[in-house]
Image: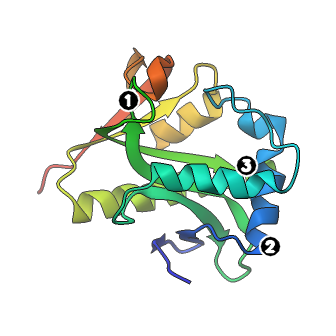
Amino acid sequence: MAVITETERLLVRPWTREPADLDALYDMYSRPEVVRWFGGGILPLTAPEQAVELLRRWELRGSRDGWYDIWAVELRGTGQVVGTTMIKQLPGPDDPVLTDDIEVGWHLHPDHWGHGYATEAARALIDREFAHTPTETIHAVVHPGNEPSKAVARRLGMSYVGLRTDWYGGTEVDTFVLHRPTPG
């Protein structure tokens, strides 16, 4: 299986349509405490077969060359999926038209909150982005009120820039930004 990036504890890899991945997707995204901060009226999944549709929607958000996408985060050694991470182009006010703005994001299964996995996976994707592309800034967009995700953005060294409505069809989101480090 292709590995997008890895850390000491984690592998970031594509989601598959294998039963174990579909089960993990359904388990995570059927939980109200996971999807409560998602915009766009996304409700918890109510049937296991909806995991395939979720993957299909995500595939539409990825880039044609495969660089930008939404991936599984698994524990090295055990292979257990603990969440999702992404780096992708943000959809603009005319969602689903993509902008040139780059977003890093994360969703974790509640059983794996508080272990630093979101920060670790997102940091690996940020490092990959800055090392291999000319991207100057990376954004994190967080639903107002989602304090745990805001804390992850701050741990990543991102600066809060305020509420914005530039993306996701004009949804109001708290926005964080990280600029490319200057050499030296």
Secondary structure at badge 2 equals: helix
Graded by Cα atoms within 10 Å as few (under 14), some (14 to 19) or many (20 or more), the crowding at tag 1 reads some
Please provide percent x and percent y for residue 52.
Answer: 72, 58
Residue located 82% across and 64% down the image: 23
Residue located 71% across and 78% down the image: 79
Q: Earlier in the sequence, mark 3 or mark 2?
A: 2
Residue located 68% across and 83% down the image: 77
Q: Give the residue type at disc 2.
A: Pro
Disc 3/disc 2 C-alpha distance (Å)? 24 Å
Q: Quadrant of the N terminus?
A: bottom right
Dot 2 corresponds to which residue?
19
Disc 1/disc 3 C-alpha distance (Å)? 29 Å
Q: Nearer the viewer, residue 145 or 101?
A: 101
Q: Nearer the viewer, mark 3 or mark 2?
A: 2
Disc 1/disc 2 C-alpha distance (Å)? 33 Å
Q: Is residue 9 left or right of residue 26?
A: left
Please provide percent x and percent y for residue 35.
Answer: 73, 36
Q: Does residue 141 sit above or below 169 in this rendering?
A: below
Marks 1 and 2 in Cβ contact (< 8 Å):
no
Q: Does residue 52 sit above or below 100 in this rendering?
A: below
Dot 3 corresponds to which residue?
113
Q: Does residue 35 sit above or below 161 in this rendering?
A: below
Q: Is residue 49 left or right of residue 21?
A: right
Determine the image quadrant of residue 18.
bottom right
Which residue extends farthest left?
Answer: 184
Q: Nearer the viewer, residue 106 or 119?
A: 106
Residue 92 got which mark?
A: 1
Secondary structure at badge 3 equals: loop
Determine the image quadrant of residue 94.
top left
Q: Earlier in the sequence, mark 1 or mark 2?
A: 2
Please provide percent x and percent y for residue 24.
Answer: 78, 62
Q: Give the residue type at disc 3.
A: Trp
